Image (cartoon, grey):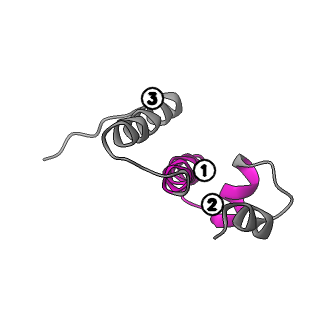
């Protein structure tokens, strides 16, 4: 049997950001790779708070100051 552990949104956010910082501190990442890790953290939080319903556009629009997804991608050269 497995035990279920409950975490608050804040705890998950802190853990995800700490994990990102841990990776960035240990691995030489360029700006693009760092941006991708940040996107992963933001996507994790958006998916979590949307009850698994967020899509990529939701993540971008909720977390970045852009008018649309294409602007987000273009700014990063993706």
Q: Position of residue 41 (x, y in %)?
A: 51, 47
Q: Position of residue 57 (x, y in %)?
A: 71, 65
Mark 1 Cα-neighbour bin, 10 Å: few <14, some 14–19, many ≥20: many
Q: Which residues are magenta?
A: 33-62
Magenta stretch secondary structure, dominant: helix
Residue 46 numbered tag: 1
Measured in 3D between alpha carbons, the distance from the residue under mark 2 to the one under mark 1, in whole angstroms, is 6 Å
Secondary structure state at the residue bearing disc 3: helix
Query: Quick check: 39 left or right of 12?
Result: right
Mark 3 Cα-neighbour bin, 10 Å: few <14, some 14–19, many ≥20: few
Q: Position of residue 32 (x, y in %)?
A: 55, 57
Residue, x 61% and y 52% (percent of image)? 50
Determine which residue is flagged by label 2. Answer: 54
Query: Quick check: 56 left or right of 52?
Result: right
Residue 37 numbered tag: none
Determine which residue is flagged by label 3. Answer: 11
Q: Residue 54 lies in magenta, yes or no?
A: yes
Q: Residue 59 lies in magenta, yes or no?
A: yes
Residue, x 40% and y 41% (percent of image)? 24
Q: Nearer the viewer, residue 27 or 53?
A: 27
Quadrant of the rendering where the C terminus is positioned: bottom right
Measured in 3D between alpha carbons, the distance from the residue under mark 2 to the one under mark 3, in whole angstroms, is 20 Å
Secondary structure state at the residue bearing disc 2: loop
């Amino acid at each position: 049997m497995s035990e279920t552990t409950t975490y608050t949104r804040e705890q998950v956010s802190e853990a995800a950001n700490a994990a990102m910082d841990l990776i960035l501190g240990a691995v030489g990442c360029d700006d693009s790779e760092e941006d991708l890790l940040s996107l992963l953290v933001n996507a994790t939080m958006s998916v979590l708070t949307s009850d698994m319903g967020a899509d990529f556009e939701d993540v971008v629009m909720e977390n970045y100051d852009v008018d649309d997804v294409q602007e987000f991608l273009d700014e990063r050269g993706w």
